[in-house]
Image (cartoon, rainbow, N blue to C red):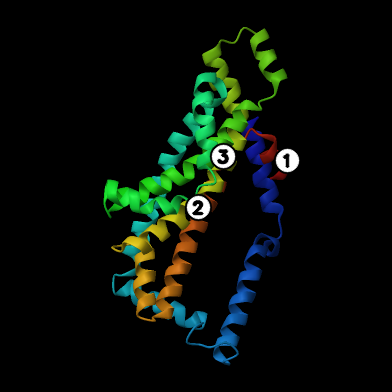
């Protein structure tokens, strides 16, 4: 079944016209073109909004000087580390809350109070606990991302179709096997949605903490360039962070399609 679904999806992709396959690029190209013209013709102040072509030149210059890639690598590794930790904590706790009443009783008020709390306001405390190095950035981002993921996992696990559970129990499925073979698999699509939701938040928080703490990272590069009124480097850093986030989001979509190759969302919308 999974092989047939993957084969059908691949066939449909091959049948898609090439111009439709790249339709998502058109708006980006048009915005960049308008930006280039507006900056070159001084419709907008080129000091504050340098042309995209100049940003490409600046990005190449920073890369050749060995500055850009280390900053991008540090930001990427911190964001990925925070996302993985948040997944481990958020998914485990969310499932436990949905399945164990005592865990739900204890953590539900804490999650409800912590979810709307502005986590970046806790930055001074995390710095006191873990210093200005990677730990404080990663742990604060993990802490912030875990709350929505716990909520998403809890709701996904709690709302599994009751008829599915009754059918599994009628067939003699034990509780442990029920959890992993029935409940978890039924909740996976919504859990993956929760994971995809926290990816942009992780990059936003990592860059913010880098801006506040200095050192290596795109946020630090942006802050230092801003103090020197180096607008091209600021925009290169912002675009670099956007590219990293976009790449990880697309990776998440790719992995989702592979994990859910058996699911109706993949077979119906391929």
The residue nearer to you, when weighing 171 against 220, is 220
Which residue was labeled with disc 2? 201
* 145 to the left or right of 267: left
The residue nearer to you, when weighing 207 against 2, is 207
Give residue 268's mark: 1
Q: Horizontal and vertical percent for residue 209?
A: 38, 58
Q: Nearer the viewer, mark 3 or mark 1?
A: 3
Q: Give the number of callouts.
A: 3
Which residue was labeled with disc 3? 192
Secondary structure beneath label 2: helix
Residue at screen point 54% across, 15% down:
177
Q: Horizontal and vertical percent for residue 61?
A: 35, 78
Residue at screen point 62% across, 28% down:
186
Check contact, mark 2 vs mark 1: CB within 8 A.
no
Secondary structure beneath label 1: helix
Within the image, what quadrant is residue 74 found in? bottom left
Residue at screen point 39% across, 55% down:
76
Q: Horizontal and vertical percent for residue 81?
A: 38, 46
């Amino acid at each position: 079944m999974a092989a047939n679904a993957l084969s059908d999806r691949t066939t449909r992709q091959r049948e898609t016209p090439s111009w439709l396959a790249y339709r998502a690029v058109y708006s980006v190209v048009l915005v960049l073109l308008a930006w280039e013209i507006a900056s070159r013709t001084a419709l907008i102040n080129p000091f504050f909004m340098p042309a995209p072509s100049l940003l490409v030149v600046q990005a190449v210059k920073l890369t050749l000087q060995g500055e850009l890639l280390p900053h991008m690598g540090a930001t990427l590794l911190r964001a990925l580390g925070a996302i993985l930790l948040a997944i481990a904590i958020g998914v485990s706790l969310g499932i436990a809350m949905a399945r164990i009443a005592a865990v739900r009783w204890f953590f539900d008020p804490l999650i409800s109070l912590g979810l709307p709390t502005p986590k970046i306001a806790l930055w001074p405390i995390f710095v006191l606990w873990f210093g200005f190095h990677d730990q404080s950035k990663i742990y604060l981002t993990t802490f912030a991302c875990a709350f929505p993921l716990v909520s998403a996992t809890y709701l996904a696990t709690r709302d599994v179709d009751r008829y599915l559970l009754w059918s599994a129990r009628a067939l003699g499925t034990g509780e442990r096997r029920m959890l992993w073979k029935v409940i978890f698999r039924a909740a996976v699509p919504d859990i993956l949605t929760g994971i995809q939701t926290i990816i942009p938040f992780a990059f936003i928080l990592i860059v913010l903490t880098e801006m506040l703490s200095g050192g290596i990272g795109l946020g630090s590069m942006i802050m230092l360039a801003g103090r020197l009124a180096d607008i091209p480097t600021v925009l290169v850093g912002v675009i670099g962070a956007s590219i990293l986030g976009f790449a990880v989001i697309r990776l998440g979509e790719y992995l989702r399609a592979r994990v859910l190759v058996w699911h109706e969302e993949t077979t119906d919308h391929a």
